[in-house]
Image: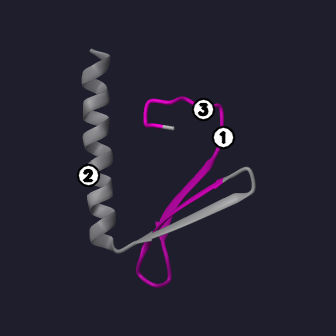
Amino acid sequence: MGINSERDIEANLQIGPTDQGMVRIFVESQGIEVPMDFDPEEAEEIAEEILAAVAAARQMKR
C-alpha cells in the first residue's frame, strides 16, 4: 500500500504531549493501537513535513 492507494478504513488520531515531555501521535483502528512518541524537535520536523504536503496538495487542486 502506497501513499496514493485509497482504503476504506476508519481510524482515530490523537496528538498531544506526554508526561515524559514527548509528543505522542496515537492511531487506533480496528482494535489496533499504535502509539508513536517523538521528542519536540522531531515533532516540529513532522509538522513541517505536513505543512509542506498541505502546500503541495493545494497546488495540485489549482
Labelled pair 3, 1 in contact (Cβ < 8 Å): no
Q: Which mark is residue 54?
A: none
Can you identify the residue that label 2 sits on? 48
Can you identify the residue that label 1 sits on? 10
The 10 Å Cα crowd at callout 3, few under 14, some 14 to 19, many 20 or more, is few
Image quadrant where residue 23 sits:
bottom left
Spot the residue most to the top.
62
Between circles 2 and 3, the one closer to the viewer is 3
In reply to whether residue 36 is colored magenta, the answer given is no
Spot the residue most to the right.
31
Q: Which mark is residue 7?
A: 3
Residue plotted at (65% across, 31% down): 8
Image quadrant where residue 41 sits:
bottom left
Classify mark 2: helix, strand or loop.
helix
- Which part of the image, by quadrant, shows the C terminus? top left
- Left or right: residue 35 versus residue 23 is right
Amino acid tagged 3? Arg
